[in-house]
Image (tube, grey):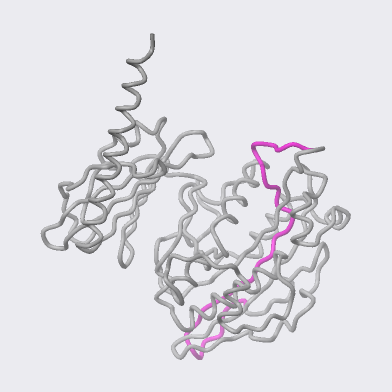
Amino acid sequence: MEARQRASQPWEGIWMNYVVLDLEWNQANGITEHEVPAIPFEIIEIGAVKLYTVPCGQPADGGSSAGDGKSGSGGGPVKGRDTEKDRRVGSGAFLIERAGEFNQLIRPSVYHEMNQATGRLIHLRMKELKKGRPFPETAEAFFAWCGEEDYRFCSWGSADLTELQRNMEYYHMEPLADGPLAYLDVQKLFSIAYEDGKSRKSLEYAVDFLELEKDIPFHRAFADAHYTAKILARILAEKPAALRNLSYDVFHPPKDRKSELKVQFDNYAKYISREFDTREEALADREVASSKCYLCRRNLRKKIRWFSPGGKHYVCLAYCEKHGYLKGKIRIRKSPAGKVYVVKTTKLISDEDAEALKARREHASDVHRKRVQRKSRGTKERP
């Protein structure tokens, strides 16, 4: 099935369109309403900003936002800010055009009482939501607003696209993608561009760090999309290479071996497998268990076989004669269908990190050995 999102290839450079979205959702209060497993989080608001990148001297197609913006449950420009302000950000070789805005409340059909924590955070009342539009109608309007040109979804964090696709599936809508969906996690990109690449800071922290103007309140869908777009525009202007670090939403895992995802980034490689019935079946698969150098493509012998240091993931250590030690990490994920799939990353590490991993392996072996001994003694002591 053809994906709705026209741009889903791993890396196409910065010359493309970006749809920066943010969602707000409600959930069961656990007292008068209980969770519906198929839709634990019901989307109640969609906000988005459209960015174009164009070479200097060339206007972006569709640069006008007329007819695009929606405020609350009605039409018209988004209120509370000058829509022409910061429309274009220069970066020498290209311009970043702010080309459209979308904001729409959604009328709930699953949870009819506002969760207290959600209501306090986003300052929305159920009375306001009842003026919204149904989710399927809003989602179709949003995708129409996104346009027919290739674009890349962007969000602050990793949850929005998963919940968007879960809500779409609940309403039996055409899938957003038929496999892993490439997108930009701007929260991760901010960390890569300006901090250690590992930390995940709040949206307001990033706005303050970059000294961006706070012109509308936080914690509503359009407001958070607005600030995320500002941060993305700054990264595009100052650290465009960071955008090579794509993320993948795996609400729909690869359907078969041929469609499994293998992507090489600047300093690591990622593999996303098809679904398996069990964890044991996944770990026994040759591709899952293999170790390859992502630089020279050689199959490597392991110095340390796969083991689980804490029960949450598996790691191994291999050695390439040309490039040195490589650390592999496997995470087992559950799919919406109740099966499992594998996310495996492989990364070159230093000799010091390799020695530390060997020490972790010895510690894990000691813990396992003591556990077996205690269990054995307990069995012998039973009458």
Is residue 151 visible from the viewing direction of this image?
A: no
* Residue 91 on the magenta segment: no
* Residue 36 on the magenta segment: yes
72 relative to 287 in the view: left or right = right
Residue at position x 67%, y 79% in the image? 64
Q: Nearer the viewer, residue 323 or 355?
A: 355
> Where on the picture, by quarter, is residue 223?
bottom right
List x then y, in percent, for residue 84.
70, 85
> Where on the picture, by quarter, is residue 240?
bottom left
Rendered view: 279 above or below 204: above
Report how many numbered discs are placed on residues in the image: 0
Rendered view: 47 above or below 180: below
The residue segment tinted magenta is: 33-62
Q: Nearer the viewer, residue 172 or 105?
A: 105
List x then y, in percent, for residue 6.
51, 60
Residue at position x 26%, y 47% in the image? 316
Rendered view: 13 above or below 159: below
Residue at position x 47%, y 71% in the image? 191
